[in-house]
Image (cartoon, helix red, strand yellow):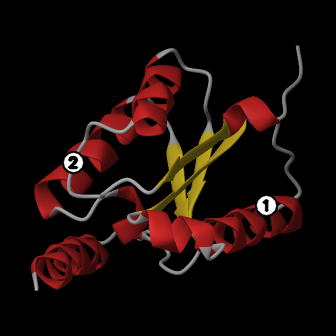
Amino acid sequence: MSDAAMVALYARVSSEQQSKRGTIDSQIVALKERIQADGAQIVEDMCFVDAGVSGATLVRAHLERLRDAAALGTIDRLYILSPDRLARKYVHQALLMEELSSCSVQVVFLNHAIGTTPEESLLLQMQGMIAEYERDC
């Protein structure tokens, strides 16, 4: 068995229009480039993509597959563009981050480094609340 980390990515856009404009494709390209830059590889089965699905709900086909894979221990590291791609409701973001952490999944946001201090955790939480506010406006 290989010692290489099992890497996954999650990408999401909320509207069909964004999906058609290629926004999801640019996310996937950026995620794959970062994975490669980190010296890792990804297999297609580990690309979880919800195109045209709101981040305000936890009921997303590929998010559910991702959560199942994490629970089975098949993911070591998960790459996501930004926290608001994971969830647009603060409580959902906090729940998913806790769930992934309890499954020993290291989450890597491309535009937001996850810190270990209380201040860095607070910043992530505040960004989750702002994402929810932006969605509601």
Residue for badge 1: 32
Q: CA distance from mark 1 to mark 2?
A: 25 Å
In the picture, measured across the screen, residue 24 lies left or right of residue 121, that is right
Identify residue type, mark 1.
Answer: Lys
Q: Residue at x 37, y 53 (%)?
A: 53
Q: Quadrant of the C terminus?
A: bottom left
- Residue situated in front as seen by the camera: 75 or 10: 10
Residue 98: which quarter of the image?
A: top left
* Residue 57 marker: 2
User: Can residue 78 be spotted in the picture?
Assistant: yes
Taking depth in this image into account, of 103 and 82 the one nearest to the observer is 82
Image location of residue 107, percent across then percent down: 51, 53
Q: Position of residue 30 (x, y in %)?
A: 73, 72
- The kind of residue on which mark 2 rests is Thr
Label 1 SS: helix
Q: Earlier in the sequence, mark 1 or mark 2?
A: 1
Locate residue 52: give its quadrant.
bottom left
At x 44%, y 69%, the residue is 114
CA neighbours of label 2 inside 10 A, class few (<14), some (14 to 19), many (20+): few
Instruction: Locate residue 62, reporting x and y percent.
Output: 49, 36
